[in-house]
Image (cartoon, grey):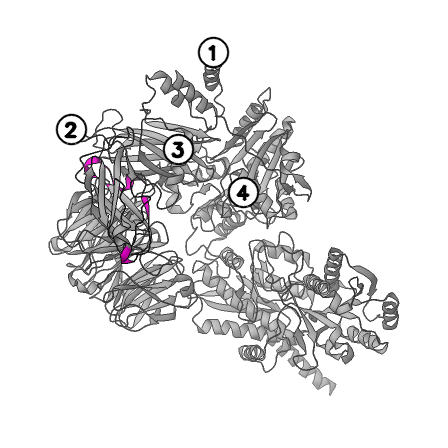
Amino acid sequence: MMFRCVPFAMIVWLCSAHAAPAWSGVTPPSVPDVEVIDQDGLAHRFYGDLVKGNTVVINFIYTTCQSSCPAATGLLSGVYHRLRAAERSVTLLSVTIDPVHDRAARLKAYAAQFGAGKGWYFLTGASADVARLLAALQVSVSNKADHPAIVVIGNDATGTWTRLYGEVSVPMVMDSLEAAAGWPAPISSSVSQ
Amino acid sequence: MRRALRYLLVAATGSIPTVLFVASPLVGAAGETAPSLPVQRFEQNGLAIELTVLPQEGSSETGTGLTAGQQATVKVALMDAKSGSPVIGIRPKGWMTGRASERVADEHTCVEKIRRLAGGRLGARAEVDLNRYVIVTMNHDQTVSVIDPQVEFGATKLESLITLPGNGEDWVLSPDQNALYVTIPDEDAIAVIDTRTRKLIQTIAMEKGSRPGRILWQPESRRLWVGLDGTGQVAGLDGAEHRWIKSITVGAGLHTLAAGPDGRFMYVTNSQSDTVSVVDTQSMVSVASVPVGKTPVAMTYSSAARRLYVGGVNGTDIVAIDPSTHRLAARIPVASGVVGLATEPQGRFVFAINQVESSLSVIDTATNAVTATTKVVKDPDQVTFTQRYAYVRGIESEKFTLIDLREARNGKLAPLDVQAGRQAPSAAPQELGVAPMIVPTPEGNAVMIANAPDATLHYYQEGMMAPSGTFSNYRRMPRGILVLDRSLREVAPGVYQAIVTLPHSGRFDVPLLLDQPRIAHCFQVAVQESPLATGSDPSPRAVRIQARFGSDLVSAHVPALLSFELLDAATQEPIAGLQDVQVLIFEPPGTWQQRRWAQEERAGRYVITQVFPHAGEYRLLVQSPSRRLRFSDTPPVLLTVGPPMSSALNSQAQAVKP
Amino acid sequence: MAHRCLRVSRTCITLGLFLMVVCLARPSAAAWIDPLTPEERQGRNVYHYGEAGSTDHVGVNLQGVEGALPPTLFRCAGCHGPRGEGTQEGGLRVPPLTPSVLRHAREGPSVGRSRLGYTDAALANAITQGLDPSGHALHPSMPRYHLTSDQVAKVIAYLNRIGEESDIDPGVSADAVTIGAALPLTGPLAQIGQDVAATLRGAVRRLNQQGGIYGRYIELIVEDSRGEPGQTALAVSRLVEIHQVFALVGSFEPAGEGRTRERLAQSHVPWIFPLTPSPQLSDPPNSSIFYALPGFDLQFRSLVDFFVSRTIPLTGTSHPRLALVHRNGPSNAEALRGALEQVRRHGLNLAVNYEYSVGRLAVLALVAQLEQQGVDAVLFMGDGEDLVSVAQELDRRGMSPIVLSAIGMVGAQARAVPSGLHSRIFLAAPIDLPTEREVASLRALSEQASLSSVGFARLAQGAVSLLAEALKQAGRSLSRQAVVHALEGCREQDTGAGFSVTFGEHHRLGRVASKVVGLMPDPPYVSPVSGWMVPEGEP
């Protein structure tokens, strides 16, 4: 049975590989369901409350970071505003890699500088919980300054995930979101650079 | 077809290779040819790794152009899978191992292989390690040797030997480490060696009688400077074209060189004129001559104080020169006899070596005061730094002094003397030179020390009481030692490169490992036979060692007969008739080791006799050059030796299985 | 006779005026000469702080996102480094901006791609449009700045000087660094002010005797704060804006004076150990003010923790009844806040909450209430005199509740409480009391026979010593940011004044813990009964 099905599967696989070069299949991360605290001091279960069934964009920051984090948060701010303008429901999660010093109040002040509002969570928590989360997403480092600049995009409902490295720009994130969330019409073209 | 299916199933689960990789087995007949495309790509979780292995120029051009015995460049590029934008901050580790069998490695085997390679020191070693360095020594017999340290086994390998036109005095590597410049005062010349081909490519002739001495690379440029001790000049050389540009008159005497920050000025001490000359590197003119103390020979630049410190053998103080005005800014009274000055890595404290007093003083450049002084090994002449320690060498001592930098910065000196060799450098006085004899290794916490009269090299790891490895310099007395970093180094954002020598022909796995995110993948490369290889060389098919003494009781102090079989890994047939089987037995970490020639007992079975000095855990390695089997090609065989037995039972001790 | 007095007095007035002018003129030494032109200086402020003057606003556009981006967070120095040397952090590599790098053409591939050298016009284009001289877009993390052409020209003018000897902060010259302190040389606190001034001068003199730091002598300017808030604010302003000091040490703080603090924050002047019992910390804290000792809020929190840890031996019950007795006023407000927070945290029973105004403490009524409520312990926030009155009444009635307060509030007068209550009084101390040797050495340093405020003198000495350490770490290439960075790196750093401090990237309070001491009949009159207690709830 398998023998006969396989040629068909082969063709389908090959065709799909050619047609959709969006990304090569990315294993969904095993997202732990740890308790995290947002900038308003409210507790959430990371997977159960924030990720499950949603399309999410995740990045990693810490408030005393001088150079890369303002840029990374600025990037997400751009994404946030475009999503709001297009009324797409995507959850943005900025996780601190310095949970000891970045408590809720500090995250709130930091988030306010970027006009973050509903749907964009700045997350901290107990050191051990946050460490587990970072390890599961493969961003733990011993020295804060060495943290990689990556953006994780995923649609938990369909199980499609991707990770963006290097020089990430707002259009790149929007493209990946489109592909992940499977929105009918591209929205990136309607907004100018 | 079945094989193709297996590929598909493998491909569909876990990490996904690209279409290219999957396509080739379907297209090709047996599906076993390694991809012959120059760039191979692997993607996982949004990150892409591209591997290219290219021959060095001058190699053969047929097929992939990779030929056994030649140099090749391994290039690893990390980028975002979608956009191709480079990813920085993730340093890959890589190896090349000859493929043991014809089976295509699946992901599981690759992960296993990488685990062993990246793991413990006594795990399997790869034939080519892309994370290593080699040691280069300048020797008494007018040669330069390139040695692969293989520190785990205490067994070095002489990779290359280059003959110089005369005895070398001082030397320097170009910043990209591709060229090595050696001054040869007796021949009034500077030799240029290409470190990739390991050949002498140029000899720059200087004026007769000029006696080129110390040499220094000008920071942020492609220029070098050489002190001409015979003619009171300093010469500027072009490091890209390997040629002399101009000689500038400075003062008389021996010249020590130092560079100012950003390379705008070079500083030269004139030991006879008692001055320091300041050379403007852009106009290549001497712009100032600063009188300093008597017989200046030592100089160092402190980045915290932004001052140049100069000390003299007969001077009574160390002076600080302000590079912006080229005038003296401070004087620090010290005892006569300063022969060396060096600034510790953080840039604030200057270490002064006094040969007359056999002492070391630490100067805080913030207050220009000596904060501490201590005795060190007798007649010190050089100091070297790692991140945590200062190493002081003494001419009259076979030891070196170790000083903790953190304590030294707090004004506390607690020197520790460590032995490195049996004879003091003064036992070979004609080999005493200015080139550094202690050099930090890239691990960051170890140094390699060269001992001239012993003709040995010593590997010392910080925290130990003694060097952990002693290596022969092949009976050549070293006059200088440096490290050539052969690991994957970043040459462009996200692009890492290393130059390797392809050890033999055949198919190789190229395992690559990234730490964060964790990606482990094995690429494959094919290497052709060298056209120079003789026809009778067998292709290196893997060998398996079957020990035949595993269940025997081996005791110390008693000769033990240890036999083993050499089998072809693919066919399991014994390999008979080898005349050059050698066994290396050592006790980790390698301080005790012995080599023995093995006798062939029966077809494929070889035996050695060995007396063990004491009970413990030992390791055995086998090599046979004619069979292309090296010590590092197979995992070591473990042997436990028990305590010495009483003599009554001696005769029954050795049970050798028939 | 009156006539003569008048004439004399006129002379006196003239003389007095003359002397005053001379005296006022003397502290202001040779004014600091800026090696940068005003244009370059303003460009430097934009580069380092993202501020284009108090009225101008710098707009930032990152990746097409307009507005809602704070320019101070995207200041050039944050990514390109305080000396334009470039940085690498978090997977982002930012190139250097020194003239030798910018003005020359660059060949790839080692840094990514080739480009021509930057001209002034090309630089302006890069800053405002995000393009390099060859027309390629810069890295998406480089924002585009909305600056007027005037402002852009200033930034470019500064970029020609970045990293050079002239690229320095105010108060720094080739051979001197100027520091300042606002102290009450006249007025009700004159004795304290004079002592602190003498201590500062002694500490600075000692540094200079060693040759200064990296060839620079320390110059100290003291402005008279007259012991009142308005004048203190003026004195601080004069130091910062007229004398242009590099940093402030010791120095009284203008309490609650909002605008001066704002201007101070804008000037980014490092301030080491303001002399105040109430550190004004915010979250995130003002980046360049470093406080030494915990304020009353933290002290009372430690005190409550201490009480909770010894409840049974002290009161004999595991559910003690507490009383809060506080004199209203700004200094006690934070003590009250801290105490209430900790009481709440431990779930303690607050039976009495008694507030009184200055001079209106009704001792009898208070003590009667304490007795009626069966209070086991009293948290007392008032001065020493009030404490003694209450203690005397308690003693008369044969009551002996535990009394908890702070040394900084009640002072030496606490010794006057009746001896029967000595063992019931516990005081929080933010710092170890000085030893005889320490006091003697302070006297020697300040060349004073006696010091009216050893506490403040110690802080002053510690401030100079810490500044010296920070200057040494910063190197010859001195900037305020380098000093702040060095101070942030202090971990248990000994100040040489009998205490050590720890700071951090957003941590501006050197010590958080307090010790609890009990009273003794003989000198030194207090003796520690606990170790250093960090209040529960502090990270």
Give me the residue at 66% from left, 59% from top. C280
Residue under numbered circle 1:
A4
User: Does label 1 lie on the same chain as label 4?
Assistant: yes
User: Does label 4 lie on the same chain as label 2?
Assistant: no
Residue under numbered circle 4:
A69
Query: Label 1 sits on what residue type?
Result: Arg
In the picture, the disc for residue B110 is 3
In the image, which residues are magenta?
B623-648
Contact (Cβ within 8 Å) of mark 2 with mark 1: no
| Distance between the alpha carbons at the discs numbered 4 and 1 | 53 Å
Q: Is residue B473 left or right of residue C4?
A: left
Q: Is residue B261 left or right of residue C339?
A: left
* Disc 3 secondary structure class: helix
| Distance between the alpha carbons at the discs numbered 3 and 1 | 31 Å
**Nearer to the camera, B498 or B301:** B498
User: Does label 4 lie on the same chain as label 3?
Assistant: no
The number of numbered discs placed on residues in the rendered structure image is 4
From the image, state whether disc 3 or disc 1 is nearer to you: 1
Residue under numbered circle 2:
B535
Counting from the top left corner in percent of width and height, residue A33 is at 62, 38
In this view, which residue lies farthest toward the top?
Answer: A4
Query: Label 2 sits on what residue type?
Result: Gly
> Label 4 lies in what chain?
A
From the image, state whether disc 3 or disc 4 is nearer to you: 3
Residue B520, can we see it?
yes
Residue C28, can we see it?
no
Give me the residue at 17% from left, 63% from top. B429
User: Does label 1 lie on the same chain as label 3?
Assistant: no
Contact (Cβ within 8 Å) of mark 2 with mark 4: no
> Label 3 lies in what chain?
B
What is the crowding at mark 3: few (fewer than 14 residues within 10 Å), some, or many (at least 20)? some
